[in-house]
Amino acid sequence: MDIKVLFGILSSVFLLVGCLPYLRDIYKNNAQPHVLSWLGWGFITALGAFAMLADGSGWTVAILFTNTFVCFLVAFYSAIKGNGVWSTTVFDYIFFGIGILGLILWQTLDLPVLALICAIIADFSFGVPTIIKTFKNPNSETWLPWFMSMMAGLFSLFTIQGLLFHEVAYPLYLFIYDMTLLLIVIKIIKKKDK
């Protein structure tokens, strides 16, 4: 088996395994995901996966398809369970709107690199409400899924076939974002006490 295939499979397994304790904590009301973030991530990673597949990317795309499934599962389960956070401020909707704009620009631009940058900006914009929510209340998240997502992002970097921007940018961004969330959840990055 090609080592890149192995890392692609491992990155997907990390995401799926990390999802299980998250779903458990949603069920027990120990985790309150920001539903708008998870829905936005689901849409953006689905589009990203299909775009990368069409552009000839290899096993790097596995993490995006798995991430799409996990994002929609978390969004719908937390909404059905009733403990998902829909919005905390008007800024949540602003960042969600920026994310939608990024999606539109990504799909309409005929410049692959610029489109990928728009996709990353959109993904980050969808994630800002989760960062804000988690920074205010780190106990609203579970550390293990963010650790597993960070590891999935790390392993997906080993699936890259060449050091091309369109293959490196999205997995690297996912690794950095998930690591940042993990550091907030485990309170290495935290609010200063007044």
Image (tube, grey):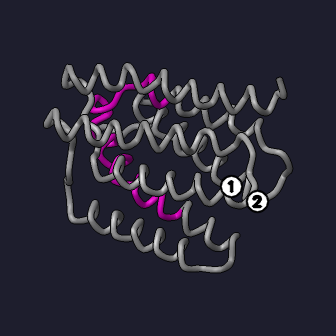
Q: Amino acid at mark 2?
A: Phe
In the rendered image, the quadrant that contains the C terminus is top left
Image marks 2 and 1: residues in contact by CB distance under 8 Å: yes
* Mark number displayed over residue 185: none
Residue in the foreground of this view, choosing between 26 and 50: 50
In screen coordinates, is 182 left or right of 170? left
Magenta part of the chain:
121-146
Tell me what residue is drawn at x 28 percent, y 60 percent. Answer: 92
Residue in the foreground of this view, choosing between 165 and 190: 165
SS state under label 1: helix
- The residue that mark 1 highlights is 169
Q: Is residue 158 above or below residue 166?
A: above
Tell me what residue is drawn at x 23 percent, y 36 percent. Answer: 78
Q: x, y (%) of residue 47?
A: 52, 58
- The residue that mark 2 highlights is 165
- Name the dominant secondary structure of the magenta segment: helix
